[in-house]
Image (spheres, helix red, strand yellow):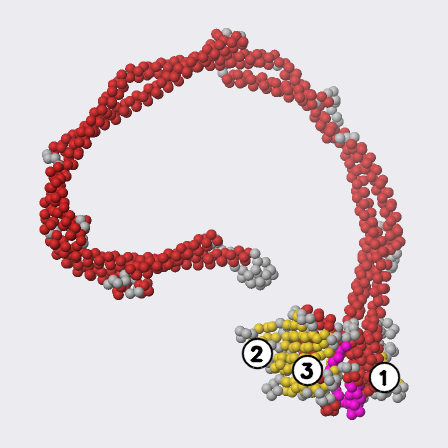
């Protein structure tokens, strides 16, 4: 993996955008990063770490604290890193979690964002996807990458002199052996759990043994009283006691069975029921004997009841025949009455025929009277017309004389008519303005109603939607899973049909308003060219001030008042011969009408004169009297005709009704006569069949109460006899049996029950003892089985824990044993470089001897001095020698981690070590070692203030503080 370019923006101490071109520095292989303390040299590596892992290089710098304090409020903090892996170029961009001002000027918190641009053009934008892809590309965790790429200042000096426990913590983080630490802790927890299980098992065993004390068994108590009771012997003794107890239970069960059979020989309840049945049988036999003595009386009562029923049937038949005879007599009387009415109607037929002849004669006379009446009316109309023509001739003379006056009057009327038309238009305009105002009010009311219903409908919909909300479920409107104030359900009658109706009403009101507006504009257009137009103004003025139309009406009224004064003078001249309204009716309201009237009057005079010569003469009063007399005669004739018609209709109706009644009465008479004959025949047959004489029917019959009483006596006798016979049949099995001695049977049963109760108490006590012993035996046997399993499991876990925790002769835990293998490889790689830097004088070794006391062993380190041939502690090295050893250890660790990560070569390394503590020769040897890294095609960045390094490696990066705060990067 090789770094190519790094861009930092609003990151750490850098307010603006800063860029590091690692590709340009790769030519020399080694570059120096210089700058004052606190300027931000380590922030360059923080940018690399954050771009790859989303975190800083040190634990003291959290990822959400990487935003620069010197950046603008709306600047975006971000890092962009370009690197290559196996010849493929990748670009990763990250922005830490930050608080900055957004585009609206408000401060908001923006979460971490990431984007990875792959060589094939694909872009990953989810943080988790970017982290997973980078982990596959780099092949190292964040801690391993930090140990390989950045050699922190002083950390490997501490690693040289640290104890095995401290190295264990450091290497655990680097090589990921936390699993072994967790295994050790899990084994410790499991060992404690096994120990608790053993203690609980022992406590349960002691409790069971304690429960067996006081059982009264001497042998068992002797085993329990020892210091360490033999559980197996106790179990064997309990098994023997179980067998003996079961034998005793079998003997008691046999005794109880024999007692049960003995008790069954004395069934007291059955014996009592048998004695009661025997007594009941004896009573039943006595009652039957008493009833047999009453058999003669019962037969006599039966015969008496049969005779009563026979006479009752015959009397009923006789009564029915009598009723038929009465109905027959009634039908005959009705037939006679109907025949009498029919005869009366037949006698009135001559009167009806006379009325018909009179009616026909009246109709004939009425036709002649109508003809004469019509002639007289025609004559009367001719006389009236003659009188009218004579008057018209006289009037026409006056009309011709005053036509001049009429012409003047007509001109005045024409002007007044024009003014009236204008006034009518003004009134119409005023009405249309009023209609426009009402339409506007209606439109506003419809709009308010629509707003009310629409708001209620939406509130109702919101309430219904709120009912479907569930806690932690997203809202279908805003997507929020928190619903602090859901809408309430309202019932305001605002359903969807009501909303549609309100919408339709609003549309209709709007259309009506537009129609009124168009009508108002058309009315104003008609007034163009009139005197009212200047008064009215524009349509917008009318809408703004409807009083303008009223002013136009007042204008017309003033002009019309002037014309009325002139017209009144002309009207006085015309009032003598013709009212003004008659002039209008005659067509004299215009000048053309006056001329036409003059010609018409002259023509009519000639025509009327000719008509007068053709009309008859005579007295109109005489003709009117004759017409009135003919009318009176005609009305009298009509009244008489109407009376005759009613009389004829009434007669026809009576005749039809009488004919129908007569037919019904005849049929009824025939039916009743037939019924009389049939009932008489049935009565005679019944008397003969029942052998009853007619004289017997005339005797006083018995009452219903007497018959019922006799029937009840018979029924009671039969019911009692049947009941007793049924009882006797049911008790036939007890015939001839004697009563049992119940007292003796009770004494025997009481003795048997006492014996049974005693045996059952013994069984209960023995069963309880056996059950307790069986439960204790089962639990003790189960505890014996669990004891071996628990002991074996405890020993296994104890052995594993001793190995894992280092509680052994070597004081070497399993984790330190694994880490010692890694440590040997690290020391082998470190000695390759230490040998070069010290000309073969020193070699780092892992000490394998056991440490003093209980101190952990396995990761202690010492240095072998080839000059003396002895190994000594690393703490005896000088400052320069310690730096060489620490640098060698750091580079060796980087080699091992790189090899462990799958062979991924990390071509860039940053060294933040104390070169200033080296003497010139040691510094030269250290630089030679770094030169060797260059030969390995590594890019080495040295964070240092040593001037010799700057001169030896001129290419580098300088971090300079800015006067206003923050820093800037300058690349050489």
Q: Earlier in the sequence, mark 1 or mark 2?
A: 2
- Near mark 1 (Cα within 10 A), the count class, few <14, some 14-19 or many ≥20, is many
Q: Earlier in the sequence, mark 1 or mark 3?
A: 3
Q: Quadrant of residue 759?
A: top right
Residue shown at 38% from the left, 17% from the top: 663
Q: Is residue 160 above or below residue 803?
A: below
Residue shown at 78% from the left, 32% from the top: 264
> Could you say whether the residue bearing mark 2 is in a helix, strand or loop?
loop
Q: What's drawn in magenta, residue-wise? A: 905-931
Query: Residue at label 2?
Result: 73
Q: Are marks 3 and 2 in contact (CB under 8 Å)?
A: no
- Near mark 2 (Cα within 10 A), the count class, few <14, some 14-19 or many ≥20, is few
Separation of disc 1 and disc 3 at Cα?
Answer: 38 Å
The spot of residue 662 in percent (x, y) is 37, 17
Tell me if residue 10 is in the magenta stretch.
no
Q: Are marks 1 and 3 in contact (CB under 8 Å)?
A: no
Residue shown at 43% from the left, 12% from the top: 673
Residue 926 is at least partly visible in this image: no
* The one of 306 and 318 positioned closer to us in this rendering: 318
């Amino acid at each position: 993996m090789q770094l190519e370019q790094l861009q930092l923006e609003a990151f750490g101490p850098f307010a603006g955008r800063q860029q590091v071109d690692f590709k340009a520095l790769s030519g020399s292989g080694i570059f120096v990063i210089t700058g004052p303390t606190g300027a931000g040299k380590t922030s360059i590596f923080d940018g690399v770490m954050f771009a790859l892992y989303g975190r800083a290089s040190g634990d003291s710098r959290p990822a959400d604290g990487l935003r620069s304090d010197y950046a603008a409020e709306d600047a975006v903090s971000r890092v962009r890193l370009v690197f290559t892996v196996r010849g493929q170029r990748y670009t990763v961009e990250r922005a830490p979690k930050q608080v900055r001002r957004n585009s609206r000027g408000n401060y908001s918190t923006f979460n971490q964002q990431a984007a990875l641009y792959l060589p094939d053009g694909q872009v990953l934008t989810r943080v988790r996807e970017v982290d997973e892809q980078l982990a596959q590309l780099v092949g190292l965790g964040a801690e391993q990458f930090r140990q390989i790429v950045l050699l922190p200042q002083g950390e490997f000096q501490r690693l040289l002199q640290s104890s095995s426990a401290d190295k264990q913590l450091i290497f655990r983080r680097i090589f990921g052996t936390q699993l072994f630490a967790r295994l050790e802790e899990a084994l410790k927890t499991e060992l404690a759990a096994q120990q608790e299980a053993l203690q609980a098992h022992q406590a349960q065993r002691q409790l069971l043994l304690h429960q067996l004390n006081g059982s009264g068994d001497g042998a068992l108590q002797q085993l329990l009283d020892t210091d360490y009771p033999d559980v197996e012997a106790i179990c064997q003794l309990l098994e023997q006691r179980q067998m003996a107890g079961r034998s005793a239970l079998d003997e008691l069960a046999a005794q109880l069975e024999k007692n049960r059979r003995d008790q069954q020989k004395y069934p007291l309840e059955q014996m009592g029921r048998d004695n009661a049945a025997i007594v009941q049988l004896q009573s039943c036999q006595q009652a039957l004997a008493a009833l047999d003595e009453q058999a003669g009386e019962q037969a006599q009562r039966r015969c008496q009841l049969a005779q009563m029923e026979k006479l009752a049937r015959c009397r009923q038949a006789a009564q029915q025949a009598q009723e038929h005879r009465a109905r027959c007599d009634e039908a005959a009387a009705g037939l006679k009455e109907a025949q009498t009415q029919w005869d009366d109607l037949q006698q009135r037929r001559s009167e009806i025929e006379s009325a018909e002849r009179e009616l026909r004669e009246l109709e004939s006379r009425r036709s002649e009277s109508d003809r004469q009446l019509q002639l007289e009316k025609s004559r009367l109309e001719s006389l009236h017309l003659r009188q009218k023509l004579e008057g018209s001739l006289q009037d026409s003379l006056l009309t011709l004389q005053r036509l001049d006056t009429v012409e003047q009057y007509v001109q005045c009327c024409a002007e007044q008519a024009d003014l009236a038309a204008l006034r009518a238009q003004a009134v119409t305009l005023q009405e249309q303005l009023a209609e426009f105002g009402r339409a506007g009010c209606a439109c506003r009311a419809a709009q308010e109603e629509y707003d009310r219903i629409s708001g209620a409908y939406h509130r109702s919909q919101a309430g219904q939607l709120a009912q479907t909300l569930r806690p932690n479920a997203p809202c279908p409107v805003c997507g929020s899973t928190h619903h602090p104030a859901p809408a309430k359900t309202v019932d305001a009658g605002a359903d969807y049909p009501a909303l549609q109706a309100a919408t339709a009403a609003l549309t209709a009101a709007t259309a009506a308003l537009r129609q009124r507006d168009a009508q108002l504009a058309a009315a104003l257009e008609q007034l163009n060219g009139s005197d009212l137009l200047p008064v009215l103004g524009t349509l917008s003025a009318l809408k703004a001030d409807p009083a303008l139309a009223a002013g136009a009406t007042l204008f017309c009224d003033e002009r019309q008042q002037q014309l009325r004064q002139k017209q009144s003078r002309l009207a006085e001249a015309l009032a003598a011969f013709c009212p003004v309204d008659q002039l209008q009716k005659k067509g004299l309201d215009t000048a053309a009408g006056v001329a036409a009237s003059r010609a018409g009057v002259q023509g009519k005079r000639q025509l009327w004169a000719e008509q007068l010569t053709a009309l008859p003469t005579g007295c109109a009063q005489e003709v009117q009297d004759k017409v009135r007399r003919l009318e009176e005669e005609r009305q009298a004739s009509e009244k008489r005709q109407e009376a005759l018609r009613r009389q004829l209709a009434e007669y026809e109706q009576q005749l039809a009704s009488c004919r129908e009644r007569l037919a019904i009465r005849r049929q009824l008479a025939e039916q009743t006569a037939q019924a009389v004959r049939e009932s008489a025949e049935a009565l005679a047959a019944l008397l003969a069949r029942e052998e009853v004489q007619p004289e017997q029917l005339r005797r006083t019959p018995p009452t219903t109460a007497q018959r019922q009483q006799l029937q009840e006596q018979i029924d009671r006798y039969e019911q009692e006899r049947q009941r007793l016979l049924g009882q006797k049949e049911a008790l036939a099995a007890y015939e001839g049996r004697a009563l049992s001695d119940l007292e003796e049977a009770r004494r025997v049963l009481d003795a048997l029950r006492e014996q049974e109760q005693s045996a059952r108490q013994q069984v209960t006590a023995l069963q309880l003892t056996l059950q307790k012993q069986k439960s204790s035996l089962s639990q003790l046997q189960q505890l014996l089985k669990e004891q071996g399993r628990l002991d074996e499991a405890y020993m296994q876990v104890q052995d594993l824990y001793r190995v894992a925790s280092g509680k052994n002769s070597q004081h070497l835990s399993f984790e330190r044993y694994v880490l010692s293998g890694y440590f040997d490889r690290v020391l082998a790689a470190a000695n390759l470089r230490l040998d070069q830097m010290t000309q073969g004088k020193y070699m780092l070794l892992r000490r394998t001897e056991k440490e003093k006391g209980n101190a952990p062993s396995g990761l202690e380190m010492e240095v072998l001095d080839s000059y003396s041939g002895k190994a000594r502690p690393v703490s005896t090295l000088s400052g320069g020698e310690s730096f060489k050893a620490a640098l060698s250890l750091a580079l060796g660790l980087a080699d091992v981690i790189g090899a462990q990560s799958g062979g991924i070569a990390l071509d860039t390394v940053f060294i933040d070590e104390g070169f200033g503590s080296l003497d010139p020769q040691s510094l030269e040897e250290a630089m030679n070692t770094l030169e060797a890294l260059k030969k390995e095609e590594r890019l080495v960045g040295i964070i240092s203030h040593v001037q010799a390094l700057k001169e030896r490696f001129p290419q580098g990066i300088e971090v300079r503080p800015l006067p206003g705060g923050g820093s800037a990067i300058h690349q050489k």
